[in-house]
Image: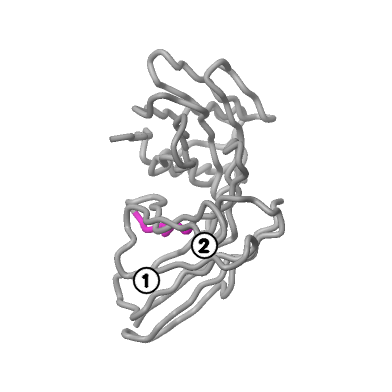
């Protein structure tokens, strides 16, 4: 298994509060991604990073920001959580060959 | 727009039976296609990866096929087991540009005893 750790794994938060999810990798891979997975939608890309301090938006980036200050860490922040952001969030990594994407175990977020 | 369509959306079979899942894609040009298995409550795990030049790849009871001309792939599961109950996701990566793969929505497979 690829060395990907997501934290927290489960969180319940109130509407309007900020939330940060962390993805940590030990593979030294260049590319890191944040996805959300909802019933009927599959995995949708929120943001991705192609290097330290190099990030870009995915298809569902509204309401989310990211930061990558070190190769091994990619943070996803919900500045003001809303109920529509209740979801399962997956971090993924891939190397420069792009041959395989490795996923973390997911972070379950509930916004009440 | 790059798209990956999977069928069926869900499938129920009896233990020991075979089944085939389909994946059609529009991603072009094409780098590789992967099948992932996602157990409930877990992250997706890679089953197979195929490049443009490959048309069959096996991983135990799982066999993936690829027809790059028709842009179709299938995942065949032989002698299904209860542990095969999961979602199976087809993922396609195009050539060049950023490494942003296109995901299908998955096929939910339930294997009954």
Q: Is residue B76 above or below residue B67?
A: below
Residue lying furthest front: A53
- Element assignment for label 1: loop
Q: What residue is drawn where x is 29% and y is 65%?
A: A62
- Element assignment for label 2: loop
Give the dominant element type of the magenta stretch: helix, strand or loop.
strand
Q: Which mark is residue A69?
A: none
What chain letter is assigned to the residue under label 2?
Answer: A
Q: What residue is drawn where x is 39% and y is 50%?
A: A42
Q: Nearer the viewer, mark 1 or mark 2?
A: 2
Q: Which mark is residue A53?
A: 2
**Residue that mark 1 sits on:** A86
Q: Residue A21, position in %: x, y?
A: 51, 72
First to last magenta residue range: A34-39
Of callouts 1 and 2, the N-terminal one: 2
Q: What residue is drawn where x is 47% and y is 59%?
A: A34
Q: What residue is drawn where x is 56% and y is 25%?
A: B64
Q: Residue B73, position in %: x, y?
A: 46, 24
Confirm whether the magenta stretch covers residue A36: yes
Q: Toward which corner of the image does residue B30 lie, by quadrant?
A: top left
Confirm whether the magenta stretch covers residue B98: no
Quadrant placement of the C terminus of chain A: bottom left
From the viewer's side, name the closer residue of A44 and A26. Answer: A26
CB under 8 Å between callouts 1 and 2?
A: no
Left of A84 or right of it: where is B71?
right
């Amino acid at each position: 298994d690829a060395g990907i750790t997501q934290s927290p794994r489960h969180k319940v938060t109130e509407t309007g509060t900020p939330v940060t999810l962390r993805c940590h990798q030990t593979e030294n891979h260049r590319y890191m991604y944040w996805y959300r997975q909802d019933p009927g939608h599959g995995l949708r890309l929120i943001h991705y990073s192609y290097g330290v301090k190099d990030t870009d938006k995915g298809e569902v980036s509204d309401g989310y920001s990211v930061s990558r200050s070190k190769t091994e860490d990619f943070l996803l922040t919900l500045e003001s959580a809303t109920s529509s952001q209740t979801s399962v969030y997956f971090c993924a990594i891939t190397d420069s060959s792009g041959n395989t994407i490795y996923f973390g175990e997911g972070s379950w977020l509930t916004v009440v | 727009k790059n798209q990956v369509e999977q069928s069926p959306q869900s499938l129920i079979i009896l233990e020991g039976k075979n089944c085939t899942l389909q994946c059609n894609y529009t991603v072009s040009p094409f780098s590789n296609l992967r099948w992932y298995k996602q157990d409930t409550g877990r992250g997706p795990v890679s089953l197979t990866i195929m490049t443009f030049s490959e048309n069959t790849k096996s991983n135990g009871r799982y066999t993936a096929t690829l027809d790059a001309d028709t842009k179709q792939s299938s995942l065949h599961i032989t002698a299904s087991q209860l542990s095969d109950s999961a979602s199976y996701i087809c993922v396609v990566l195009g050539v060049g540009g950023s490494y942003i793969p296109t995901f299908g929505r998955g096929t939910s497979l339930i294997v009954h005893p």
